[in-house]
Amino acid sequence: MAKIFCIANQKGGVGKTTTAVNLAAGLAQLQQRVLLVDLDPQGNATMGAGINKAELQASVYQVLLGMADVKTARATSETGKFDVLPANRELAGAEVEMVELDNREKRLKAALAEVDADYDFVLIDCPPALSMLTLNGLCAAHGVIIPMQCEYYALEGLSDLVNTIKKVHAKLNPDLKIIGLLRVMFDPRMTLSQQVSEQLEQHFGDKVFKTLIPRNIRLAEAPSYGIPGVSFDPTSKGAQAYIQFGAEMVERIQSM
């Protein structure tokens, strides 16, 4: 049975897609079978995995609307060694088209149930807004991984996200819980980063992952080559941190 995790944060530019792609590649290097679901119409996770979103025969859009299944729509990231349920601009229209459909919040969950035995991990890269797409991700998932920059505004947005997760847990998905907070783009030279990091640890305790993802230029360069950072430059600090995070995820899931 696959463990399904949303990578979500209502704030944009916090490293959700970088985390999704590199965690997928890091888990694949640990011999885990991984599916990465791109739920963002921008399709950045699709491109970051080395898949051309302009040439897709089918995508998550068709899957959500019942015009295709996951097995026919998925593609393989040759550079990351994991499968991808890709996305492109078509997905932006799904919001409107799903309004009149039955079980609109749980269409992704139903689609993923058909490939449950094929994977150890399913990672869902959510868009930076509480939309019907994000809601589908949260309803399908067992837990949420929250990438966080250690800055003041990130703390402000975190309380909104936690409240959203509580509401979805109460009304739509009783299995949903916060798996952990991942500190990303961390710069130990900044006093503010250290202060916010300490606040997170005090407030959330063991929900904060031990792994810290540093600011790293090689991670930022990798998507332009269509290669996950952990494969693009395995010796970089960022790549090593994501592989370490993958190992921490496997360990945390085994102890759940």
Image: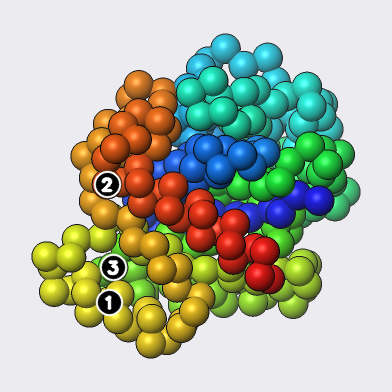
User: Where on the picture, by quarter, is residue 212?
Assistant: bottom left
Residue type of the residue flagged with mark 2: Lys
**Left or right of 180 on screen, residue 190:** left
Residue occupying the point 57% across, 77% down: 163
Q: Looking at the rendered structure, which numbered label has been put on residue 150?
A: 3
Quarter of the figure with residue 196 = bottom left
From the viewer's perspective, tell me whether residue 236 is left or right of residue 83.
left
Q: Position of residue 112 (x, y in %)?
A: 79, 43
Q: Position of residue 83 (x, y in %)?
A: 64, 30
Is residue 128 at all visible to an observer of this figure? Answer: no
Q: Would you name the residue on which mark 1 appears? A: 196
Q: In the rendering, which numbered label is found on residue 165? A: none
Question: Residue most toward the bottom?
Answer: 202
**Disc with the residue nearer the chain's start (3 vs 2):** 3
Residue type at the position of mark 3: Cys
Task: Give the SS element for disc 1.
Answer: helix
- Counting residues from the start of the chain, the first of labels 2 and 1 encountered is 1
